[in-house]
Image (cartoon, helix red, strand yellow):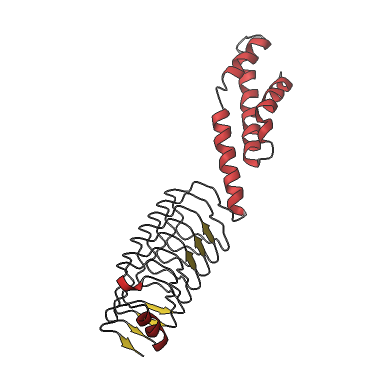
């Protein structure tokens, strides 16, 4: 009968034999069933009846197996730094370290990445609505064609990062490092960049309606083909080249200091 139990479990677990976690479940279940089989036989049931009662005691374990196998495969993807096409909505990922990770085509809405190190990671065509990147290291990250509404980057390091052709309405950037960052083609309407320093930052073809740069400092910043007419530069300080580009694009540079 023990051999019959093993064959029965082999049939159930065959599709999952490559997963270590499921193998462990199978071994534990076999031990439990062997004990139950012995108990039923000790109670006076014949072998066939004892076997049937043992199998009936299992119930439907397919749902449990599917859950474990799905999680195991997901973890394998994480180990390979590939989170693409995974639903990670509302996940607590505070303080994780994933260099050169791939979060492409993923659902990341309301996920918390605060304090995480995501250096050179890629986020392409992903939903990052309400995501928290507070204090995160996103240097060299690439975020393309994604939704970043209400995203919080407060205190984040975005040196050399690229956020292109993405929706950043209502995102916040307090105390961020934005050196050599590229916002080309992104919608930054209504975003507040007050009091920040921009060195080598690129805003080419960006949407800047109502975007505020009050008291910001600009050095070698590019605004080619950006709609700077409706951006706010009150109290900003900038080098001559940046000033010339903005002036030529008819930006309102009243109360701007040129250095």
Give the image location of residue 37, x and y in percent: 64, 19
187 displayed left or right of 162? left
Q: Quadrant of the N terminus?
A: top right
Q: Residue 23 at x, y = what percent? A: 66, 36
Give the x, y percent position of residue 69. 59, 38
220 and 2: which one is in front? Answer: 220
Q: Position of 105 compared to 211: left or right?
A: right
At 42% from the left edge and 86% from the top edge, which residue is drawn? 241
Q: How many numbered discs, if any?
A: 0
Q: From the viewer's side, name the closer residue of 82 and 97.
A: 82
Q: Residue furthest right?
A: 3
Q: Is residue 113 visible?
A: yes
Does residue 98 sit above or below 196 in this rendering?
above
Quadrant (top left, top right, bottom left, bottom right) of the C terminus: bottom left
Looking at the rendering, which quadrant does residue 61 occupy?
Answer: top right
- Occupied quadrant, residue 196: bottom left
Residue 13, above or below 200: above
Q: Which residue appears farthest toward the bottom when viewing the image?
A: 259
Q: Where residue 175 sits in the image (x, y, percent)?
A: 36, 73
């Amino acid at each position: 009968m023990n051999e019959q139990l093993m064959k029965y479990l082999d049939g159930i677990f065959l599709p999952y034999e490559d997963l270590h976690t499921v193998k462990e479940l199978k071994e534990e279940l076999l031990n439990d069933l062997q004990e139950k089989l012995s108990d039923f036989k000790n109670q006076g049931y014949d072998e066939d009846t004892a076997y049937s009662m043992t199998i009936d005691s299992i119930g439907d374990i397919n749902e449990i197996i599917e859950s474990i196998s799905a999680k195991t495969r997901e973890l394998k993807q994480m180990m390979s730094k590939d989170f693409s096409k995974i639903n990670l909505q509302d996940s607590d990922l505070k303080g994780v370290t994933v260099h050169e990770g791939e979060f492409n085509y993923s659902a990341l809405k309301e996920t918390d990445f605060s304090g995480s190190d995501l250096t050179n990671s890629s986020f392409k065509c992903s939903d990052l609505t309400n995501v928290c990147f507070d204090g995160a290291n996103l240097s060299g990250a690439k975020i393309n064609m994604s939704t970043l509404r209400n995203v919080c980057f407060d205190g984040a390091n975005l040196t050399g990062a690229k956020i292109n052709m993405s929706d950043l309405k209502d995102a916040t950037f307090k105390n961020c490092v934005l050196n050599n960052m590229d916002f080309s083609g992104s919608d930054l309407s209504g975003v507040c960049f007050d009091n920040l320093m921009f060195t080598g930052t690129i805003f080419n073809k960006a949407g800047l309606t109502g975007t505020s740069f009050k008291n910001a400092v600009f050095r070698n910043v590019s605004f080619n083909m950006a709609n700077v007419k409706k951006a706010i530069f009150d109290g900003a300080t900038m080098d001559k080249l940046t000033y010339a580009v903005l002036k030529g694009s008819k930006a309102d540079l009243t109360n701007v200091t040129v250095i």
